[in-house]
Amino acid sequence: MKQHKIVPCLWFHTEGGKISEVTNYYQNIFGENIQVGRIMPLGETPTGYTEMCEVHIFERKYNFMSTANPHHLFNDALAFAINCKDQDEIDKFWNYFTQDGKEVQCGCCIDKFGLRWQVLPENLGLLMSKPNSFEIMMKQKKIIIEAYL
């Protein structure tokens, strides 16, 4: 795997601090595009039992940590954009993340762990160059490509 100088560390909260709950959730949607490293138990910390692991999603490295007690929750200051090739791919990610999460607006949603996702068509720039595209986007939660055409 490629070496990364800067690696985002995402801090989750799960029942009992078990990181496998997080990795299993993302493995269900990312399939072969996620590789999960060895789980490292850190034991009891000020936020309860804690585990960590290294994860690669689409060849980008992340460190995941999960604690038994909530500490710093995710918020709108951080979101991951998924550039989707077509409406079917948008629907796949959107439906998975909102099943136990929630819809927001303009292609944004929040998964069951509180992580924000922007589920966008890879040709968003072209779609946004069309007349009334901003107004269309402001009325949408999940992006429906056909509305821009």
Image (cartoon, grey):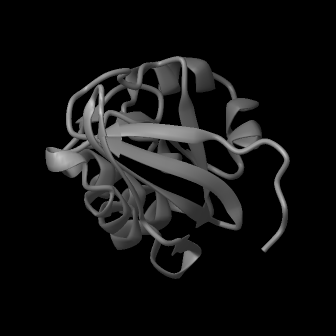
Residue 111 left/right relative to 129: left
Name the quadrant of the C terminus.
Answer: top right
Count of numbered circles in the view:
0
Q: Please tell me whether residue 1 is drawn above or below residue 42 in the rendered image.
A: below
Q: Position of residue 57 (x, y in %)?
A: 59, 63
- Residue 148 visible in the current orientation: no
Quarter-wise, where is residue 110 in the image? top left
The answer to which of 48 and 11 lies nearer the viewer is 48
Left or right? Give the position of 132 relative to 129.
left
Q: Please say if 81 is above or below 132.
A: below
Of residue 54 and residue 56, the one placed in the foreground of this image is: 54
Who's the residue at 49% across and 26% down the image?
136
Q: Nearer the viewer, residue 124 or 1?
A: 1
Residue at the spot 39% in from the left edge and 62% down from the top edge = 26
Q: Could you say where residue 84 lies in the image, as x and y percent from the top left?
A: 59, 58
Q: Quick one: quadrant of the N terminus? A: bottom right
| Identity of the residue drawn at 69% across and 31% down | 128
| Residue closest to the far bottom | 32
Within the image, what quadrant is residue 34 found in?
bottom right
The reply to whether residue 65 is in sight is yes
Q: Position of residue 30 (x, y in %)?
A: 47, 69
Q: Could you tell me residue 85's position as x and y percent?
A: 62, 63
**Residue at x 56%, y 50% (from the top left corner):** 63
**Residue at the extreme front:** 44
